[in-house]
Amino acid sequence: SAMDIADSICHKEEFERSLYRYLISEGVLSEDRVRIKDKDWIDVTRFSYERFTDFMVVKRLIEKLYKKESGEFDIEVLKERYLKDEYAAWRHKGIVESLFVQLPEATGKELFELLPECSSYESVVDAFIESFIWRNPEYLNDKTTDYINKYIMCYKESRNNFINSLLLISS
């Protein structure tokens, strides 16, 4: 458990003085209950830093779903869990943003190449824009440019948000 890991790093006899308690009180970790299956609940500890958690979830997803040898990616899991519809994409916007950062580096493909039917979802466009500041420029290509031109530059709000991201990168 997270408590055991923290305790192995810095053991304190009293819970109130423990590293685990400190990480909880400072907001680095948070305790929660999640439902598994239909009825059962379990206690979990999460990183509060949402982007870090999303990054780690996506890293694990790519490890499970991408077959390097064949270059195949099981997109059905992504579609069913995270991009089933506009609402699912909105609910999992952090995961989608992290997919935009990590997929090109791991697979050489953009998310919109793997799931073109999701390309125009507003939350997917927003996640792409938000991801841009974290992306490795080596993995930008003509398909990336085409996506930007088709789904971002022709709309005032997304164009302004994208330009703001570019200004952030350049400063």
Image (cartoon, helix red, strand yellow):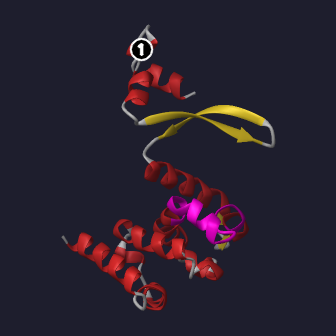
Q: Which residues are magenta?
A: 79-96
Choose top left, top right, bottom left or bottom right for residue 137: bottom left
Q: Is residue 132 above or below residue 45?
A: below
Residue under numbered circle 1 = 16
* Residue 29 spot, x, y in % from top left: 46, 35
Q: Is residue 77 above or below residue 43?
A: below
Decide if residue 71 is on the left or right side of residue 134.
right
Quarter that holds the N terminus: top right
* Residue 151 spot, x, y in % from top left: 48, 86
Decide if residue 153 is on the left or right side of residue 102.
left
Choose top left, top right, bottom left or bottom right for residue 121: bottom right
Work out whether residue 60 or residue 111 is closer to the camera in this orientation and state it: 111
Q: Is residue 67 visible?
A: no
Q: Is residue 168 above or below residue 159?
A: above
Most common SS among magenta residues: helix
| Residue 86 falls within the magenta-colored stretch | yes
| Residue 65 falls within the magenta-colored stretch | no
